[in-house]
Amino acid sequence: MKKGVFPGSFDPITLGHIDIIERALPLFDEIIIAIGSNADKSYMFSLEKRKQFIESIFEGNKKIVVKTYEGMTADFCKIQNAGFIIRGLRNTTDFNYEQAIAQTNLQLSGIESVCLFTSTKYSNISSSIVRDVIRNGGDYSILVPKSVKVEEK
Ligand code: ADP
């Protein structure tokens, strides 16, 4: 069984992430969307919220599992018995960052990284831009799936 892990902060999940997941689906028997939780990082959305947003998008899709994890992605892959890490590349900054991590994961754990290039229509989207738009009261709805909602204060 070919299992891929798509790791990320997903703070929040965006249309760019969903595009990568949908395009990776035909390549794998199962995709684990792995939401990272790092005690040193501060997030706009809680781990529970980030998980809820993702679960409601892929509800009923038997090939997709949503999990949370702490620590090294490669260790999580081993525990899950997954041989592949899925990543999305938007630009050369992503490329340089992902290249070093992918090479290290292969060297240390034998885990292959499968990188998909962003679709042109989503290449401008990042979770950090979405958070900026939200903080400044802008219309974030065209950047994220419908399940992502900011609670009014
Ligand atoms: P991380 O903090 O691990 O980068 P993110 O949630 O920001 O987590 O991103 C997870 C993955 O999704 C990364 O591989 C990132 O490059 C990719 N990604 C994010 N936005 C897009 C997009 N618009 N198009 C394609 N890939 C994307």
Image (spheres, helix red, strand yellow):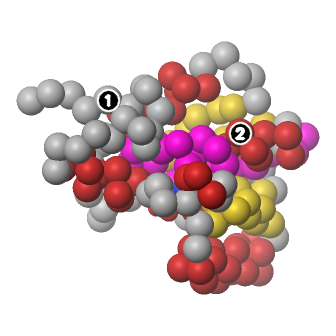
Q: Is residue 113 above or below residue 27?
A: below
Q: Residue at x 78, y 57 (%)?
A: 84
Q: Residue at x 74, y 23 (%)?
A: 62
Asked if residue 93 lies left or right of residue 37, the reply is right
From the image, tell me which residue sits under label 1. 149
From the image, tell me which residue sits under label 2. 22
Q: Is residue 100 above or below residue 133?
A: below
In x, y percent, where is residue 46?
A: 30, 40
| Residue 13 lies in the magenta stretch | yes
Q: Secondary structure at mark 1?
A: loop
Determine the CA span between mark 2 and mark 1.
21 Å
Residues in magenta? 1-20
Nearer the observer, 75 or 65:
65
Q: Which three-letter amino acid code belongs to the residue tagged 2?
A: Glu
Q: Which three-letter amino acid code belongs to the residue tagged 1?
A: Lys
Q: Residue at x 70, y 74 (%)?
A: 102
